[in-house]
Amino acid sequence: MTLQISNEIFADYLRCEYKAYLKLTGRTGQKTEYQKLQDRLLRQYRILACEYLFSNRYNNETSLANVPLSKLRKKTCKIAINVTATLNQFSVVIDALTLTTSSKPPQYVPMTLVHKENVSKDDKLHLAFYGSIVAQKLDRPPPFGRILHGDKYRSIKVHLHELITEATQIMHRIVVLKESDNPPPLKLQVGITIGSSKTETGYLSFSIMTMFHGTTTMLSGQSNCWQRIQIRT
């Protein structure tokens, strides 16, 4: 069975073309503990974010969950979550689609759920990836989308016209990469991520992650105790 291009592979391509190639060719190894942690945090956040949407923003509104995109053509529900869609070599699950009446006739616009406090360009491209799928399946590009993010579930509106064009080009490059026999060049990644939060004991909890040449080094702990973890990726 041919491997379909998923949300995860699109996100991997944005971060590292070589990593996406390995997944497309079935040559990936085990996930690191840090990657497993990030996956778990995102799954938990999506559950809580959906509960927030249903209880605060779409209370008593008609809704659907775990439905194919084709079922939404009649526009009978205000919000749908975990919407599945297949398009050529792509098979994706869209976080959410909401019905907007600001355009005539009303249409569905995509929403993505991001557990981070800060929204990146990659997050906007992932939203536009959903928008591109919706545009091609429902024959009408959504003019905008929304990103729900952070502990307070802030919502930002993202205009999608130019981003959908960019995301569609990336989709084409992923297809070309999938069909290629030659891997892309492996690029060094150097970066640092710093985060902090207050614990129940009153200490500040810090986490610092650096990436260099395939090695992820993570410092974590409280202001009175630090530990260093090094992970090969």
Image (spheres, rainbow, N blue to C red):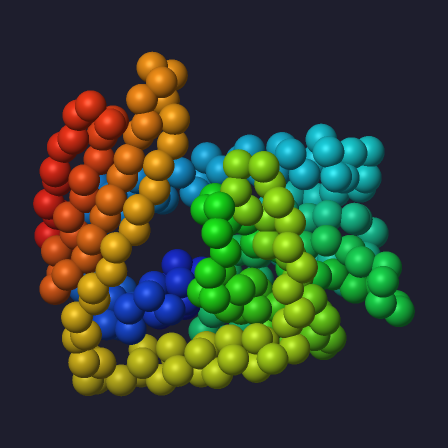
**Residue 122, how many percent across, how many down?**
45, 65
Query: Which residue appears at 39% of the width and 82% of the height?
Result: 173
Above or below, 36 relative to 10: above
- Quadrant placement of the C terminus: bottom left
Query: Which residue appears at 76% of the width and 39% of the height?
Result: 58
Q: Count the marks: how many?
A: 0
Indicate left or right for 148 with 55 as reference. left
- Closer to the camera in the image, 207 or 35: 207
Observer able to see residue 52? yes
**Residue 208, how many percent across, how many down?**
24, 44
Query: Which residue appears at 12% of the width and 40% of the height?
Result: 229
**Residue 13, how many percent across, how many down?**
35, 69
Observer able to see residue 1? no
Indicate left or right for 29 with 9 as reference. left
- Closer to the camera in the image, 117 or 19: 117
Above or below, 147 relative to 185: above
Above or below, 112 relative to 50: below
**Residue 218, how many percent across, how many down?**
18, 44
- Quadrant placement of the N terminus: bottom left
